[in-house]
Image: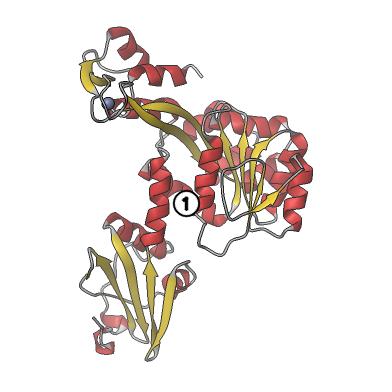
Amino acid sequence: MEVDAEVLVPRAQAQPVGGAFAESAADALVAEARRRRASHIHLETGPAGCVIRLRIAGQLTEPRHHPLDEALAATLRAAPGVSVLALGQGERIVLRLDGGERRERALEAIGMSRGLIDALLPALRRGGLVLVAGPEGSGRSTTIATLLGHFAGSPRHIAAIGTLPVDGVTRIEGLAGAAAVRAALEQDPDVIALDRLDGREAAAAAAEAAEEGHLVLAAIDAPDAVSAIRRMRDWRVEPFRLASTIAATLAQRLVRRLCPDCRRPVQANGSVSALLGFDSGAIVYAPVGCESCEGSGFAGQTGVFEAIVADGAIRRLINDGGDEAILARHAFLRAPNLGSAARALVREGLTTPDEAVRISRG
Ligand SMILES: [Zn+2]
């Protein structure tokens, strides 16, 4: 189906769309397309304005007319997976969303919520330092590999240090810490990934690489997201450098996922309810055991996440050496911390109260 050039309405007649066409028009459009499960965004530009349509369930939606938004067109034009065709005095920009959707499903599969993915991906696209905290065996490497997978298919050069389970990257072998980061930088990568920040020199090298414009993903031994920032401070990464380079700090744990075929609703017992802050008599789920879970009552594991995505206030707090309690309060005002993320999984019946209690004890 083609849209005739006449459909393009003059700028003066076009309907302004309140707020949506502010500076983040592209983000808003992609978010809308994703929410509506569109496979493609079509943007046709012309001297008079632009027309937006989405392909949803195989059908193009009715054209929406807007004043020409050059910033929106430029952002879409630069997106990976885009196709641009000259069209009279304008162009047709078609952005395919399938691939991105598929990769985001990989992030959901390791336990990231929609809200976390939506907050994290724009931060990753801007570059900077991304720390993934947790004890060993908490799934940090899988998370870093899955985040790297998000860039698979886009023309980015990834250098990986250590034993990250990811293909199609430049591997830096036989070196560790700061020397490995320097060797990675010599390979001129867009992205550097480290399976573990192991000390002050590696931390400094990672922060410097991020400062130079690389996206740097690194696992760090710290129990939670605020502690990861403290660890960087302890390693004497300068506050201004940490504040200006940090993109996000994640922390995670793994909990056992209840088998969906046999889990059984039960009333939470009093002491567990008290520990988790549930109302007495709250309904939770218990493992039973069936054929599909080989009698265990569980089916694999899922990540529980908290994230501090850097905004202006977080950067100011880090730069000023702000108190950790204030940092945590600001970061988790609207986003869940590890404890509340685990409680949400219990309420959804994805895991048991015992698993949530276990991770809340470290
Ligand atoms: Zn089962």
Residue 347 picture location, percent across and down: 28, 26
Q: Is 205 placed above or below 252 here?
A: below
Looking at the image, residue 2 sits to the left or right of residue 79; the answer is: left
**Quadrant in the picture for residue 82:** bottom left
> Is residue 113 visible to us here?
yes
Looking at the image, residue 151 sits to the left or right of residue 108; the answer is: right
Residue 10 picture location, percent across and down: 29, 85
In percent of the image, x 61 and y 37: which residue is there?
A: 219
Residue 123 picture location, percent across and down: 51, 51
In this view of the protein, which residue sits in the foreground, 209 or 226? Answer: 209
* SS type, badge 1: helix
Q: Tell me the amino acid under the disc marked 1.
A: Leu
Looking at the image, residue 329 sits to the left or right of residue 164; the answer is: left
In this view of the protein, which residue sits in the foreground, 20 or 115? Answer: 115
Q: In which of the image's four quarters is ligand 1 placed?
A: top left
Residue 344 picture location, percent across and down: 33, 29
Q: Residues within 10 Å of mark 1 (few under 14, many from 20)?
A: some
For this orientation, the residue located farthest to the top is 271
Q: Is 246 placed above or below 297 here?
A: below
Looking at the image, residue 361 sits to the left or right of residue 159; the answer is: left
In percent of the image, x 45 and y 71: which residue is there?
A: 71
Look at mark 1 in the image and give the residue it sits on.
121
In this view of the protein, which residue sits in the foreground, 11 or 291? Answer: 291
